[in-house]
Image (cartoon, rainbow, N blue to C red):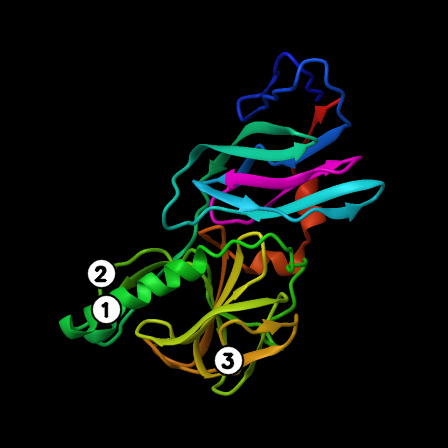
Amino acid sequence: MRLRAGGFWRWGAALFCALWLIPGAAWAAAWVTFPTSWDIGQAFAVSLTADTDYKDPAVTWMGRTVTLDVEQGGAGKVSYGLLGSDVRKIKPGDYPLLVEFTQGKQRFHVKGSIALREKRYPSEELKVAPKMVNPAKKDLPRIKKEGQLTAAALRTMTAKRRWTTPPGLPLSMIHITSHYGFHRVFNGQPRAPHAAADLRAAVGTSVRAPFAGTVVLTGHHYYAGKSVYLDSGNGVVTVFFHLSEIKVKKGERVARGQVIGKSGSTGRVTGPHLHFGLNLAGQYVDPMPLFETSVTELLKKGRQVKVLD
């Protein structure tokens, strides 16, 4: 697809682009790649490439604007984004996506939409102590305060890309005990779908950072127990719950593969394990498929649009 000054083309039911140019201005070619449809709860990739410099690239998705890095790519420049949709909050339908960047003194806007499809996830019923389902009234102020802290951590937005794909494994051995998307029923009471993957891990097992990044929050929280939130740029935040020990501190830069803590059973749990979550610009997605793919492979499932001549 080619897009020129003075108009736009529709691309099926799921994608369209619009571009505004300064009359008479000459600009180098650029391309935007993203999928026209995708499964709810699964991560997808977006890219912007150009054969000359640009600056301030950003993607707006699900009400959040994600700042992207500008990197050398082939004979030009490239920016990568990793996005998705939360199985707990998002319903099937068409959702708008906006890609923006600046060349010279002009700001360009490429609009599109992605059709999100329903994905069926299994359900599980658990019998737990009543306090595991309904917290005591005295604990509610603590839970509210911790919710504000974690929400702020998940709003972290830095432009430097420190995530790479596939990520490193958080544990030396991976065995999923509770998958992402499970519709949980505690003592007969339905709860929101599981927004992470629970991984089998004996108390004291080393937990490693899957991406390089900066620690934006640590704490001992009511639900999550001892936990770590790691920002890896472009809205990519990984979370690690129920640790027995925390080996990093807020503000610390960590390398991919660095030990950030030890697994445990702190917080609201029925036994020792690692709760491993991947949050992309405020949307919790299934982290496990990324271990078997890369941003390059994800982009191959999208469509490339030429947006400049």
Say which mark, if any, is on residue 7: none
Q: Kindly identify which residue carries mark 1.
A: 133
Say which mark, if any, is on residue 201: 3
Q: Quadrant of residue 52?
A: top right
Label located before the other in sequence (3 or 2)? 2
**Disc 1 to disc 3, how far (Cα)?**
23 Å
Label located before the other in sequence (2 or 1)? 1
**Disc 3 to disc 2, how far (Cα)?**
27 Å
Q: Quadrant of the C terminus?
A: top right
Pointer 2 with pointer 1, Cβ within 8 A: yes
Q: From the viewer's perspective, tell me whether residue 33 is left or right of residue 88.
A: right
Report the span colored magenta: 39-60
Q: Which residue lies at the image location 65% right of the left edge and 60% below the top edge?
A: 162
Element under disc 1: helix
- Residue 226: image location, x then y, percent: 41, 78
Q: From the viewer's perspective, tell me whether residue 22 is left or right of residue 219.
A: right
Q: Magenta segment, principal secondary structure?
A: strand
Pointer 1 with pointer 3, Cβ within 8 A: no
Within-10-Å neighbours for mark 3: few <14, some 14–19, many 20+: many
Q: Which residue lies at the image location 76% right of the left edge and 38% below the top edge?
A: 53
Label located before the other in sequence (1 or 3)? 1
- Residue 237: image location, x then y, percent: 52, 60
Mark 1: amino acid: Val
Mark 2: amino acid: Gln
